[in-house]
């Protein structure tokens, strides 16, 4: 079983980014346990003085989930041409630990054409700095309109669902190689 941690960069309840990850969890192929990290809003503002034992509980939980995962799949909105502050804060909390170092990672960009590249580019820069193993073939754009998210918080479109399942297969194949 390959465990993939799904991390959204959005705190918005109706986020298309979170919907994409919820949908990925639903369509995970056999042999993949896709777990959604849902505590982004609970993380305290990064403070290097607090990056010591004992860690703040939400940070310890984040690092524990990252450490136990075989890979991480991110999906984040773009705010003002870059990563949302709350999501960058999450990434900042990973710098002091080793949970994400050499971890296979990928991301999905669900923004409309012409949007989201600033966030994707910044995420690539940060993940490279963190020493992750970026699976470029699993980094994809899957445009998701807000009205594509159903009342259950997932996406019903069969093409998007198939593409998300393929992303997870690509990650799993990379982890297994």
Image (cartoon, helix red, strand yellow):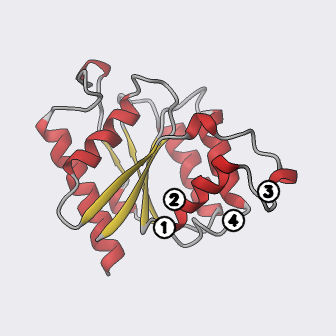
Q: Which residue is mark 2?
A: 65
For mark 4, give the secondary structure.
loop
Residue located at (60% from left, 59% from top):
63
Q: Which residue is mark 1?
A: 68
The relative height of residue 1 versus residue 162 in the rendered view (above or below) is below
Distance CA(mark 3)–CA(mark 1): 20 Å
Discs 4, 2 touching: Cβ within 8 Å = no
Residue located at (30% from left, 28% from top):
153
Going by the image, does 147 lie left or right of 134? left
Distance CA(mark 4)–CA(mark 1): 13 Å
Discs 3, 1 touching: Cβ within 8 Å = no
Task: Give residue 39's position: percent from left, percent from top.
Answer: 54, 40
Discs 2, 3 touching: Cβ within 8 Å = no
Mark 1 nearby-residue class (10 Å; few <14, some 14–19, many ≥20) = few
Residues 127 and 17: in front is 17
Q: Earlier in the sequence, mark 4 or mark 3?
A: 3
Distance CA(mark 2)–CA(mark 1): 5 Å
Image quarter where the N terminus lies is bottom left
Would residue 83 be seen by someone viewing this image from the given angle?
A: no
Discs 2, 1 touching: Cβ within 8 Å = yes
Q: Which residue is mark 3?
A: 51
Write down the quadrant of residue 26 in the picture.
Answer: top left
Discs 4, 1 touching: Cβ within 8 Å = no
Q: Earlier in the sequence, mark 4 or mark 2?
A: 2
Q: Earlier in the sequence, mark 2 or mark 3?
A: 3
Front label number (4 vs 2)? 2
Distance CA(mark 4)–CA(mark 3): 9 Å
Distance CA(mark 2)–CA(mark 3): 17 Å
Distance CA(mark 4)–CA(mark 2): 12 Å
Write down the quadrant of residue 15 in the picture.
Answer: top left
């Amino acid at each position: 079983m390959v465990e993939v941690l799904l991390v959204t960069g959005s705190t918005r309840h109706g986020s298309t980014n979170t919907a994409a990850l919820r949908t990925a969890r639903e369509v995970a192929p056999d042999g993949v346990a896709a777990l959604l990290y849902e505590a982004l809003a609970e993380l305290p503002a990064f403070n290097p003085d607090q990056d010591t034992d004992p860690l703040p509980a939400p940070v310890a939980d984040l690092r524990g989930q990252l450490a136990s995962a075989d890979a991480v799949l991110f999906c984040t909105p773009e705010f003002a041409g870059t990563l949302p502050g709350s999501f960058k804060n999450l990434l900042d909390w990973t710098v002091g630990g080793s949970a994400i170092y050499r971890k296979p990672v990928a991301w999905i960009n669900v923004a409309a054409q012409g949007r989201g590249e600033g966030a994707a580019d910044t995420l690539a820069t940060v993940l490279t700095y963190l020493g992750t193993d970026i699976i470029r073939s699993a980094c994809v754009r899957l445009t998701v309109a807000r009205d594509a998210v159903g009342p259950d918080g997932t996406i019903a479109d069969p093409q998007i669902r198939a593409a998300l399942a393929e992303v997870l297969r690509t990650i799993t194949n990379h982890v297994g190689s």
